[in-house]
Amino acid sequence: MISKPKHQHPLALIFALYEWGKVVTVPVIIVVAVSVRSLLITVLAALGLVLVTLIAGLIDYLMFSYQLTEDEIVIREGVFVKKVNHIPYDRIQNVVANQWFFLKPFHVESIEIETAGHADGPEVQLSAVPEQFKQTLAQLRQAAPTPAPDPTLAPTEAATTTAAEPLSEPKAKPEATYQITWHELLKFAFTSPAFLSGLLAILAVYGKMGNKVQEQIFDVLANSVAGLGLFVLISIILGVLILFYLGSAAILIARFYHFKVVRTADQFNLSSGLFKTRTTTIAMDRIQAVVIKQPLLRRLLKIATVKLVVISNSKKDSSDKDVIVMPVMMTTNLAQFMADFFPTVPAQPEMDYATAARTYFYDLRNAGLIFLVIAAGLGFGLYRWPIWLSLAVLLVALIWLVPAYLKARRSSVFVLNETYAYLSNNQFFTKNRYFVPKNKIQSLERQESIWLQPKGFAHLSLCCRSGEGARILKVKYLPAKAIDTVVAWYKC
Amino acid sequence: MTAQIDKATKLPKSIKVIWRIKELIGLGITLIIAGVLEFIHFMTSGTASLWWQRSALILALLGVVVTIFTLILIEYRWNFWTYYIDDRQVELHNGYFFRKQIVIPIARVQNVTLKQGPILRWKALQKVIIVTAAGSDVIDGLQTAQADNLKVLIMTLAREAKNDI
């Protein structure tokens, strides 16, 4: 099974050329723009740069090789600066395969291998290797000498680790499979709040532009809008919003097209995508936590999303790097899904315990005080325009007080069994329910104050790993009794 | 929690000197900034200049008041800053008005860093930083021998309870 150093499939050239193409685009544009006088020079210069791209791409391709040895994968690359990267199999966190539609007929795919290292992206990026590569890698990873099993591992997990040792056993047998239906996919795409973040991103770009540019854009917009009536203006704004909404839905549909998740004894295989099929493999014991997320709209429609918190070197924002294992599901089917796909995670109790009245009091008091300060500031600035003032105050109340109420209502933490704890909290309007194994909690912090203690209330933070950093799961103002149960569970 | 506080160890008394010095250094820096503001007032004129002086005054006053308070509270801070180690976990407790209890299982400890600046060296103390895969926690200062023992103890226990990343 151990291979010699190999070049990638010739199709990798496309990707190398694409990368170099991006690099030379700007010089080409400059050359064309500067030397408008002589057509000959322009053409020659442009041709020269295209030639550079071709040669550089070819050299990149020829100097890149990969090799699978008994216990590591070795990547060699570079012409002047030689780079040799060794990645031991037991350090691999996630393996992602991307297959663009034009690679499919050649049975070739791109592979990304992530470790827990703090690199700028995947440690290994193979742009075109045969489809069997993944299988071979998986076999080698299983055969590789695993480190001594963690004595602190829960019995069930320790059992799976030891069970993985005899190679002869057929390991890849699927134990649970789920395939998204069209109906569910549409529901997922059209209930996603992602289009809002798209809008925010555009606003952020606008905010980053210089004042001059901003003024110009504003003037152009204002001039073209000036002639229009209010009705037309509102229709345009609505139209843009709807366009964004449809656009983001289309992107989501393309990304989660034919979404399929397969669980084998020790790993998850996720695949989806219309133009680019993305297959992710995640080993069970690399999962840091399971989270069920419900943004406002999905909560109202009684549907939820299940994600995995994993270690990766993704640069994305906190919760975007969580891996979706279940895009959308009726809450009534959740228990079955969890039982099928996470057999070690105990069933979630029917009802979270009722929130104490004091929790509401504390959360609303804190948010209320800040709200009063903001409202006073707004009143000071806007008292001459009572309509705008009341609108602004209403908006602030909506984004301050409602989440505070939801936070109090949704915060809870308790022990499920020896291995798992359950923590639910609120993030703006989204409800998060975390199932965290004890051995993935890196540290725990319990906080209380001299004023909270007599009332029997405290805060709790569980510190876990996520992406390339930490994720702190926090609940505030819960009965100290509930929190102490978790602390005691964590300590033994 | 109270039961553990009884078993827990306090930091060496000399840490109080360190804390006091640190507070005074902080005050010194604040006063220097205030001095710079006052200097700007001295060099300029007009209404804006008056504001420089006022902010210098406010900054200096705030700095002095806050420092006096923290200096008074250092006795309490020491009294409520404790740590506790058994063969399963390291526990840090601190704070009186706002109490914090941090639990780090030894199996989750990645490494222990000992750090010593000039002030700590003068008092023969060492700062102990306990690093996990998701962050780090600090014991402000232990006697050098004590810190070394602690490091050896934690790392021995951590090796016994070897974990995968």
Image (spheres, rainbow, N blue to C red):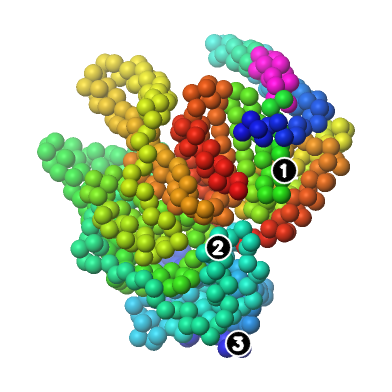
**Which residue in the protein does label 3 denote?**
A2
Mark 1 vs mark 2: give the one in front: 2
Q: Which residue is disc 1 drawn over? A: B85
Q: Nearer the viewer, residue B86 or A250?
A: B86
Q: Amino acid at mark 3?
A: Ile
Q: Which-is-in-front pick, marks 3 and 1? A: 1
Q: Is residue A484 toward the left or the right of residue B103 in the image?
A: left
Q: Main secondary structure of the magenta part?
A: helix
> Which residue lies at the image location 55% right of the left edge and 75% below the top edge?
A164
Q: Is disc 2 on the same chain as disc 1? A: no
Query: Is disc 3 in contact with disc 1, using a CB cutoff of under 8 Å?
Result: no
Residue A5 lies, in percent from the top left, at 61, 86
**Tag count:** 3
Q: Measured along the vertical axis of the image, is residue A428 above or below residue A128?
A: above
Amino acid carrying mark 1 in the image: Ile
Start-end of magenta stretch? B63-78
Q: Chain of mark 3?
A: A
| Cβ atoms under marks 3 and 2 closer than 8 Å | no
**Same chain assignment for discs 3 and 2:** yes
Look at the picture and state if A342 lies above or below A124: above
Tell me residue A279's x, y (percent): 41, 72
- Mark 1 to mark 2 CA distance (whole Å): 26 Å
